[in-house]
Image (cartoon, rainbow, N blue to C red):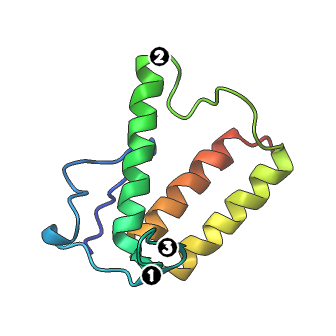
């Protein structure tokens, strides 16, 4: 995969770069826990991450359309400590899969959480 990020610094998907395996994105292997509903097999990690990045981008666009900031929560879901632990786990996940789309997704979500956490 190229060094270009598929996620913008604000955490949104760059649709010009995130076009799937047909445009040079690597196949990342299979997911460990996410499964195909019909076959029960693991999913391609790259396609899985791309789907989640697309969902995040859509959420960001919806939030902006409603006049909220990108990623601005509609309600508090995690405590500050919980958010820190989740962000650290996402950082670890990003380190396990360097160069994969899943790592970019984990890193992007971690950055979004760290921005919200009061340290």
Q: Answer whether labels 3 and 1 touch (C-beta < 8 Å).
A: yes
Q: Kindly identify which numbered label has been placed on residue 66.
A: 2
For the residues labelled 1 and 2, the Cα–Cα distance comes to: 38 Å
Can you identify the residue that label 3 sits on? 35
Q: Give percent across and percent down for residue 103.
A: 48, 69
Instruction: Give the answer, above or below, for where 34 lies relative to 19.
Output: below
Q: Residue furthest left?
A: 22
Percent x, y of residue 20: 23, 65
Q: Position of residue 82 (x, y in %)?
A: 81, 52
Residue shown at 17% from the left, 73% from the top: 24
**Residue displayed at 54% across by 71% down:** 94
The 10 Å Cα crowd at callout 3, few under 14, some 14 to 19, many 20 or more, is some
Which residue occupies 20% across, 59% down?
19
Q: Earlier in the sequence, mark 2 or mark 3?
A: 3
Question: What residue did someone put label 1 on?
Answer: 41
Vertical side of 40 occupied by 119: above or below: above
Look at the numbered disc 1 and give the secondary structure of its residue. loop
């Amino acid at each position: 995969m190229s060094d270009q990020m598929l996620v913008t610094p604000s955490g949104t998907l760059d649709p010009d770069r995130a076009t799937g395996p047909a445009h040079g994105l690597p196949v990342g292997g299979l997911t460990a826990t996410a499964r195909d509903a019909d076959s029960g097999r693991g999913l391609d990690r790259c396609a899985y991450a791309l789907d989640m990045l697309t969902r995040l981008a859509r959420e960001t666009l919806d939030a902006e359309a409603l006049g909220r900031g990108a990623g601005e929560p509609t309600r508090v879901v995690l405590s500050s400590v919980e958010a820190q632990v989740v962000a650290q786990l996402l950082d670890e996940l990003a380190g396990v899969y360097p160069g994969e789309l899943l790592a970019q997704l984990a890193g992007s979500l971690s950055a979004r959480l760290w921005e919200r956490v009061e340290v």
